[in-house]
Amino acid sequence: MANPAPNLECRMYESKYPDVDMAVMIQVKNIADMGAYVSLLEYNDIEGMILFSELSRRRIRSISSLIKVGRIEPVMVLRVDRERGYIDLSKRRVSDEDKGACEERFNKSKLVHSIMRHVAETVGVDLEELYVHIGSMNQAKKIPEDFYFHGSKF
């Protein structure tokens, strides 16, 4: 019997949801009557929403000039309802400094995530399991040899 394919989907950070007042990278998925539905790229594409009132500080003449389906950009987290899984976001509250820091953090995380995904695929383990294993090495700051398990795939 063949081994099942490893699960290669995983969020980039330990926390399941972002913190309030944190800048996160999103991709616009759909524009509806009340706002835009987006995927949080750093959090395994969980869904969030940007209300139209949170798109710009100025008067909105054309929604399509402010937000386009498929666009990737940083936004600010306003509210997180962990029980319902709702995340409210704002494009207008992100400062230029927050945008730069968010883009830099996202690019570094994306690179690490890509390497980890490749290792997980090559070794044949779940990506989240690999993150937990490597993360425990990093947080403990012990000798790496202490974390090798005899007979393990790592």
Image (tube, grey):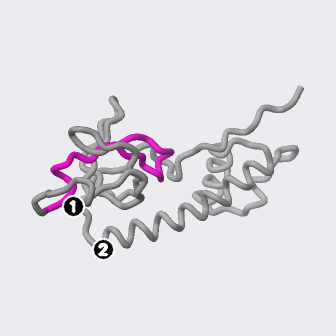
Q: Farthest residue toward the left?
A: 59
Magenta stretch encompasses residue 142 = no
> Which residue appears at 53% of the width and 47% of the height?
11
**Amino acid carrying mark 1 in the image:** Arg
Local secondary structure at mark 1: loop
Magenta stretch encompasses residue 55 = yes
> As rendered, which of 11 and 27 lies closer to the eye?
27
**Residues in magenta, as a range:** 37-57
Q: Is residue 8 left or right of residue 26?
A: right
Q: Which residue is mark 2?
A: 97
Q: Which residue is mark 1?
A: 93
| Residue 44 x %, y % | 50, 45
Q: Are marks 1 and 2 in contact (CB under 8 Å)?
A: no
Q: CA distance from mark 1 to mark 2?
A: 11 Å
Q: Which image quadrant for residue 59?
A: bottom left
Q: Farthest residue toward the top?
A: 1
Q: Is residue 129 left or right of residue 2?
A: left
Local secondary structure at mark 2: helix
| Residue 29 x %, y % | 40, 45
**Amino acid carrying mark 2 in the image:** Glu
Q: In the image, which disc is placed on residue 117?
A: none
Placement of the N terminus among the 4 image quadrants: top right
Q: Is residue 23 left or right of residue 59?
A: right
Q: Which image quadrant for residue 60?
A: bottom left
> Which residue appears at 36% of the width and 34% of the height?
85
User: Is 135 rendered above or below residue 128?
Assistant: below
Crowding around mark 1 (Cα neighbors within 10 Å: few <14, some 14 to 19, many 20+) is some
User: Is 57 rendered above or below residue 38?
Assistant: below
Crowding around mark 2 (Cα neighbors within 10 Å: few <14, some 14 to 19, many 20+) is few
| Residue 110 x %, y % | 56, 61
